[in-house]
Image (cartoon, rainbow, N blue to C red):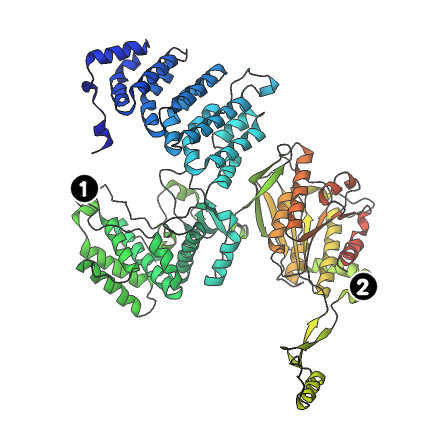
Amino acid sequence: MSAVADIPSPTDLSAERLQALRRQLDCPFAQIDDVFAACMAEAHAKLSDEGLEDYLSQARFLGKMGRGVEPALIFLQEWPPIAHTVGEDALIAVMTTVRLINKSPNGKAIAPFLQTLAAVARRLPTPTQLQHYMDLCLLVLERTSGSIHGIHKTYPSPSLALFFEKAPLLLGVLSLQGLSNWVNYGIRNYSHHPEQQRDFFSLTSSDSRAVLQRERHGTLLMDHTRALDLYLNALWQDGDVLVPYSTTFDVQRQPMPYFDAYGMRLPDLYDGRAGVSGIDRYRAALAHMAAHRRWSTPIFADNFSPAQRLAIECFEDARIDVLTLREYPGMRRIYSALHPRPVDGACNPATHSCLRHRLAMLSRALLDPPKRFESPQLADWVQRFHALLAQGESNTTEIAGLALSYLGKTRMQSDQLPDTWFQDTEVDYRDDNRHLWRFHELSDDEDSFDSPDQTPSKQELQTLPPRHYPEWDYTSQTMRPDWVSLYERLHPSGRSADVDALLEKHSALSKRLQRLLVLLKPQDKVRVRFQEDGSELDLDVAIRSLIDLKSGSQPDPRINMSHTTDGRSIAVTLLLDLSESLNEKARGSEQTVLQLSQEAVSLLAWAIEQLGDPLAIAGFHSNTRHDVRYMHLKGFGERWSDDVKARLAAMQAGYSTRMGAALRHAARTLSTQAADKKLLLVLTDGQPSDIDVKDERLLIEDAKVAVRELVHQGIFTYCINLDASADAYVSDIFGKQYTVIDNITRLPEQLPKLFMALTR
C-alpha cells in the first residue's frame, strides 16, 4: 500500500473538527482556507496529538508575525512531511531560527527558508544534521547582514535568501562539512562586496563553482590528470588534453563523455558506483574512447534514420568493448559492473518505444559470456556478432551492416511511439559517438551559417584548452581554487638566422664562456670495481679469486666492474617574463630590454647545450586572470636547433605579469624530469601585476606562496631581476634566491655566468 493511502482524506475529518482547528489557527488570510482541509488531513496522519497542537500554535505565530500569508501558508503545507522525516522535536530549532531571522532585517528570507526546508530535510534526515544546517544559516545571517559600508544591522544580507534557494542543490553534491567550507569561503572573501556576494551564493560566479567542485565528495578529474595521462600513454600509446565538464548544474540532461580536436571531455567528478572506484570509472571511459580512436572509422550519416544510427552506435560500442577486453581482459570486471542490466519485459510496448531497451539488452548480452537463459532471438544475434569478430577485428562499416540487419528484423510498430523507455539503458562509461559520423551536408541550424568551416584552424589547434590554477588571497588567507585560466601554446617562429647573428655578435664572449664550460662539463667515465654484476670482467680481481679458489680459500664473488659518468644531473627551466615593459629602452643603451633578453637567452641556451643539461624555455604574460598565456620556446626533448632559434627570434612582449600561475605551470613539466637537481630560473623586469588586480601586494603574495609550493616539489627557484628597485619586493617572493642586475646592458654576459655559478 502506498504512503498516500495512509493519509486520510479531508472528508474523514468532521466539519466541526475542521472548523475548530481553523478557529484555533486564528489566521485571517483567505488563501489558507483553500488548503486547510488537505493540510489537516496530512497532519492528522503524520503528527501526534501534541505535535498537532504545536503545529497549529507555530502556524498561528507565523500568520501574526507581520510577514504576510506566505510564511504561514508554506509552513502549513511543508511541516508535516518534514516532521515525519526528522521528528517533531525539530520544530523548536526550526522556529528558533525563524524568530532570529525575523528579528533581523532579513524577514523576506523566511519564506525561502521554509520553502526549501523539506528538500533539505530529505538530505539531512536526523535532528543533529538539520541543527548543523540551521547553525550554518545563522552564520550566514550574522556575517553578511549589516556589513555594507561598516553600518551595523542596517542592511539585509544580500545572500541569505539566495543561500536558502540553492541549499537543496548544494546538499545534493556536498557533505555538511563541504557546505560549511563553501559558505565560509564566500563569507571570508565577499562579506564586504554585496554584488560579488550575491554572485557567489547564487552559484553564478566562477569562483563559487570552483570552490563547490573542490568540496564535492568523489574523485576529481583535475586531481588525477597526471595519472590518467600516464594510463593513456602506457596502455593505449595515446594521449590528449583531458578537459572536465560540470555535471552539477545540468540537472535535466547529463552530458556524456566525448572527444574532439580539442581534447577528451570527461565529467569533472566521478563517485564510486557498483563497487567501481571513481578513478576506475575514469579509466573505463578513457579506455573506451581510446579504443574508438584506434578501431573506429567515421561513416556518413546522411542516409540513416535516428533509429538506424542508434542501432549502429550500439553495435559499434559493443565491438569496441569486445576488442578492448581481448587486449586487456582485466577491464571485464569494471565494464560488467558499470553496464546496466535491463530486465526482459520491463518495457511495455503498448505504452513505450522499447528500441533502446532491446538494444541495451543486446549490448549486455554481447558483453557477457553466453547464457542459456537468453531468448532464442537474442542468442542468434549474439552468435552472429561474435562470428563476425571471430574473423578478426572487423570494422565500422561491417558492423553497421549487421546493425541495420538487426533493426530490420526486430523492428516493432511501437518503436515509433513518442514515449521512449530510458530506464537501465544508459552505459555511462561510453562516449556520445559524435566522432562516428560524417556529413555530406552541414546542418541547417543557424549556427552553421555563421561558421561553415567546422574544422578548427591550425592556429586554434596550437592553443590547448586552458589549465586552471589556484591563487592565494592573502587578505582572506584562502587559496582560490581554479582561479586563473592559463593557455599554453607553441611560440610563433621567426628567422633562425637572426639568432645566429646575435651569437656572432658575442663571439668573443662565447670563447670566454667556452673555457668556463670545459670545467663544468661531465668528466669521463669512472670505473666502479668489486661488483657481482657488471658490464665487464675485472681481470685483477678475477685472477685473485681464482688463486683463492685453487688454494682452498673462499673466493671473492665480486669479479665484475661497471662504469658510471662522473657528471651533472641537472634539469633547467628558464621562465621569461614577456610583459609590455620589456619593450622599453634599456638604461644606457639603444636596445630594448626585450632585445637584450633575446641575446642573453640565446647565449644561455647555447651554453647549456654545450653542457648537455636538459633545458626548457618558456615565456608568459597575462591579460587578467582569465587569460594567462604560457608560450613554449624550447622543450626538454628538443636540441638547440633552427626551430628553437626561430622561436627565440620571434619573441614579443605585451600585457601584464601574473607570475604565480606561470610558476605553477612551469613546475608541471620540470617536476617530471629525472634529474637530481631541478632549477627554475625566472627572468623578469618588474613585480607581479595585472590589470584586474588593484592591490599590488596580492600577486606578490601569491607568487611567494607559489615559490614555497615549488620548494615542496623539490624545485629550486632563482630570480634574475632587471628592475633597479626590485629589492622592495623580490626578497618577499624568492627570499635570498635572487640577483638584481642594475646594468641591463651586461645581461648577455651575466646570465650565462650566473647559471654556471648556480650549477657548479
Q: Which residue is mark 1?
A: 351
Could you tell me which secondary element the residue under label 2 belongs to? helix
Q: Which residue is mark 2?
A: 516
Q: Do the residues under discs 2 and 1 have CB atoms within 8 angstroms?
A: no
Give the residue type at disc 1.
Answer: Thr
User: Is residue 317 or residue 22 the one in the foreground?
Assistant: 22
User: Is residue 97 or residue 380 the one in the foreground?
Assistant: 97
Residue 376: name its quadrant.
Answer: bottom left
- Is 205 on the left or on the right of 38, as rendered? right
Count the numbered circles shown: 2
Q: Residue pushed farthest bottom? A: 550
Residue 78: image location, x then y, percent: 33, 23
Residue 736: image location, x then y, percent: 77, 46
Residue 73: image location, x then y, percent: 34, 17
Residue 704: name its quadrant.
Answer: top right
Could you tell me which secondary element the residue under label 1 belongs to? loop
Q: Spatial distance from mark 2 to mark 1, Cα to Cα?
A: 86 Å
- Is 638 on the left or on the right of 37, as rendered? right
Residue 667: image location, x then y, percent: 62, 51
Give the residue type at disc 2.
Answer: Leu
- Disc nearer the start of the sequence (2/1): 1
Q: Is residue 548 visible from the viewing direction of this image? A: yes
